[in-house]
Amino acid sequence: MQWIFENWLILVFGVGMIGMHLFGHRHGKKGGHDHGSKGHSHKQDKKNKNQTEEATDA
Protein backbone atom coordinates (compact mmCIF):
# COMPACT_ATOMS: atom_id res chain seq x y z
CA MET A 1 0.00 0.00 0.00
CA GLN A 2 2.91 2.34 0.73
CA TRP A 3 4.23 1.80 -2.80
CA ILE A 4 0.91 3.00 -4.27
CA PHE A 5 1.07 6.23 -2.25
CA GLU A 6 4.68 6.84 -3.30
CA ASN A 7 4.12 6.12 -7.00
CA TRP A 8 0.57 7.38 -7.60
CA LEU A 9 1.63 9.61 -10.51
CA ILE A 10 3.15 6.70 -12.44
CA LEU A 11 -0.01 4.69 -11.86
CA VAL A 12 -2.24 7.52 -13.11
CA PHE A 13 -0.20 7.82 -16.33
CA GLY A 14 -0.20 4.05 -16.83
CA VAL A 15 -3.96 3.72 -16.37
CA GLY A 16 -4.51 6.72 -18.65
CA MET A 17 -2.38 5.25 -21.43
CA ILE A 18 -4.16 1.89 -21.24
CA GLY A 19 -7.54 3.64 -21.22
CA MET A 20 -6.70 5.76 -24.27
CA HIS A 21 -5.44 2.71 -26.14
CA LEU A 22 -8.63 0.77 -25.48
CA PHE A 23 -10.84 3.79 -26.18
CA GLY A 24 -9.20 4.22 -29.58
CA HIS A 25 -9.98 0.64 -30.60
CA ARG A 26 -13.69 1.07 -29.95
CA HIS A 27 -14.06 4.02 -32.29
CA GLY A 28 -12.93 2.37 -35.49
CA LYS A 29 -10.83 4.51 -37.79
CA LYS A 30 -10.99 7.68 -35.71
CA GLY A 31 -8.26 6.60 -33.29
CA GLY A 32 -6.16 3.82 -31.92
CA HIS A 33 -4.31 1.23 -33.93
CA ASP A 34 -5.51 -0.39 -37.13
CA HIS A 35 -4.81 -4.09 -36.65
CA GLY A 36 -4.84 -5.90 -39.98
CA SER A 37 -7.42 -3.85 -41.82
CA LYS A 38 -6.99 -4.28 -45.56
CA GLY A 39 -9.64 -1.77 -46.56
CA HIS A 40 -8.57 1.34 -48.41
CA SER A 41 -10.15 4.70 -48.13
CA HIS A 42 -12.42 5.84 -50.93
CA LYS A 43 -10.32 8.96 -51.47
CA GLN A 44 -7.15 6.90 -51.93
CA ASP A 45 -8.85 4.62 -54.48
CA LYS A 46 -10.11 7.64 -56.41
CA LYS A 47 -6.64 9.24 -56.38
CA ASN A 48 -5.04 6.03 -57.67
CA LYS A 49 -7.65 5.75 -60.44
CA ASN A 50 -7.07 9.34 -61.56
CA GLN A 51 -3.30 8.83 -61.66
CA THR A 52 -3.74 5.68 -63.74
CA GLU A 53 -6.03 7.46 -66.21
CA GLU A 54 -3.57 10.36 -66.57
CA ALA A 55 -0.74 7.95 -67.29
CA THR A 56 -2.67 6.18 -70.04
CA ASP A 57 -3.85 9.45 -71.64
CA ALA A 58 -0.32 10.73 -72.23
Image: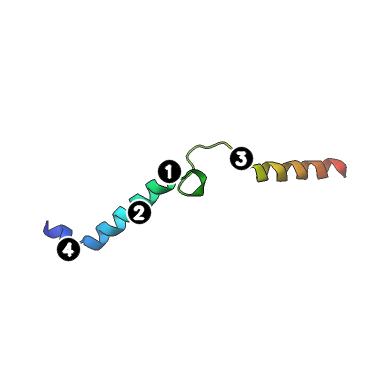
Cα–Cα span, label 2 and label 4: 20 Å
* Badge 4 or badge 3: first in the primary sequence: 4
Residue bearing mark 1? 26
Which dot, 1 or 2, sits closer to the camera? 1
The amino acid type of the residue labelled 1 equals: Arg
* Badge 1 or badge 2: first in the primary sequence: 2
Give coordinates of residue 24: x percent, y percent.
43, 48
The amino acid type of the residue labelled 4 equals: Glu
The amino acid type of the residue labelled 3 equals: His
- Pointer 1 with pointer 3, Cβ within 8 A: no
Cα–Cα span, label 4 and label 1: 33 Å
Residue 55 in the figure: left or right of residue 17: right
Cα–Cα span, label 1 and label 2: 15 Å
- Pointer 2 with pointer 4, Cβ within 8 A: no
Where, quadrant-wise, is the C terminus in this rendering? top right
Residue bearing mark 4? 6
The residue shown at (53%, 37%) is 37
Residue 2 in the figure: left or right of residue 40: left
* Badge 2 or badge 3: first in the primary sequence: 2
